[in-house]
């Protein structure tokens, strides 16, 4: 009989599974490619487990996942903690009436959409993304949640680029801002 054992990775081991791609999608950007983390089952499971552990003490009833790389973490967190799972999507993706917010990215601009009835007055939300760079994406998503009635907003992302100051800006304005690893 074979003994199957899940290997638990620590955050340094997880970091080694992320691939750094220079000058993608445009010159000057050092892209953190998490597809190689996702392809590694121990790394994926360990990352989700650590994220769940870091947020389980917080008071929130909805998990808001940011399209698209935020979905990999937000779905498993909502599932693990039995929370409502809300999608923050790019334009043209949501079928019903949605509220929207425009924002700037480290490269380019974008708009985030959330179904108007997905967040109710007094909700406490956890916004989930893969990476905080300038913080613009998380800021727009968190503000949109507040505009829809959220009374408390916490944020978690796998990666922080602290030199760009995004996580600090978010921490000044919202509840807890949690990140697992820095570049
Ligand atoms: P920002 O709004 O500037 O905080 O940018 C965060 C969003 O852009 C996240 O959803 C990331 O997926 C993506 N992003 C920004 N910079 C990078 C980077 N250097 N590597 C990978 N993804 C990035």
Image (tube, rainbow, N blue to C red):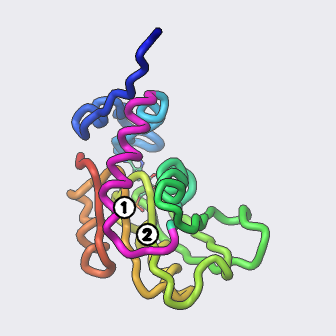
Neighbourhood count class around disc 1 (C-alpha, 10 Å): few under 14, some 14–19, many 20 upward: many
Q: How far separated are the C-alphas under marks 2 and 1?
A: 7 Å
- Residue drawn 50% across and 66% down? 63
Q: Secondary structure at mark 1?
A: strand
Q: Secondary structure at mark 2?
A: strand
Q: Which residue is mark 2?
A: 126
Q: What is the number of the mark on residue 156?
A: 1
Q: Quadrant of residue 126?
A: bottom left
Q: Is residue 55 visible?
A: yes
Instruction: Where is residue 48? Give x, y as percent.
Output: 41, 46
Q: Earlier in the sequence, mark 2 or mark 1?
A: 2
Instruction: Where is residue 36? Give x, y as percent.
Output: 44, 30
Asked if the residue at tag 1 contacts the one at tag 2, i.e. Cβ–Cβ closer than 8 Å, the answer is yes
Q: Nearer the viewer, residue 73 or 17?
A: 73
Instruction: Where is residue 149? Give x, y as percent.
Output: 53, 89
Q: Is residue 53 magenta?
A: yes
Q: Residue furthest right?
A: 95
Q: Nearer the viewer, residue 22 or 55?
A: 55
- Residue drawn 45% across and 29% down? 41
Q: Is residue 140 visible?
A: no
Q: Quadrant of residue 4?
A: top left
- Main secondary structure along the magenta-highlighted residues: helix
Q: How many marks?
A: 2
Residue 20 falls left or right of residue 13: right
Mark 2, ligand 1, within 8 Å: the answer is no
Q: Residue furthest front?
A: 1
Residue interval drawn in magenta: 40-62
- Residue drawn 64% across and 80% down? 99
Neighbourhood count class around disc 2 (C-alpha, 10 Å): few under 14, some 14–19, many 20 upward: many
Q: Nearer the viewer, residue 134 or 131?
A: 131
- Residue drawn 32% across and 54% down? 53
Instruction: Where is residue 92? Give x, y as percent.
Output: 73, 64
């Amino acid at each position: 009989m074979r003994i199957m054992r899940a290997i638990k990775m620590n955050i340094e081991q997880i970091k080694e599974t992320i691939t750094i791609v220079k000058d993608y999608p445009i010159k000057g950007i050092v892209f953190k490619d998490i597809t190689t983390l996702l392809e590694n089952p121990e790394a994926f499971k360990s990352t989700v487990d650590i994220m769940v552990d870091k947020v389980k003490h917080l008071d929130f009833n909805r998990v808001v996942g940011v399209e698209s790389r935020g979905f990999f973490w937000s779905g498993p967190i909502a599932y693990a903690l039995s929370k409502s799972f809300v999608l923050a999507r790019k334009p043209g993706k949501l079928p019903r009436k949605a509220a929207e917010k425009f924002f700037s990215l480290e490269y380019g601009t974008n708009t985030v959409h959330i179904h108007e009835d997905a967040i109710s007055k007094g909700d406490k939300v956890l916004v989930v993304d893969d990476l905080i760079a300038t913080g613009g994406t998380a800021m727009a998503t968190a503000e949109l949640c507040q505009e829809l009635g959220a009374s408390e907003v916490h944020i978690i992302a796998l990666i922080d680029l602290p030199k760009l100051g995004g996580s600090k800006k978010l921490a000044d304005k919202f509840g807890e801002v949690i990140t697992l690893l820095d570049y």
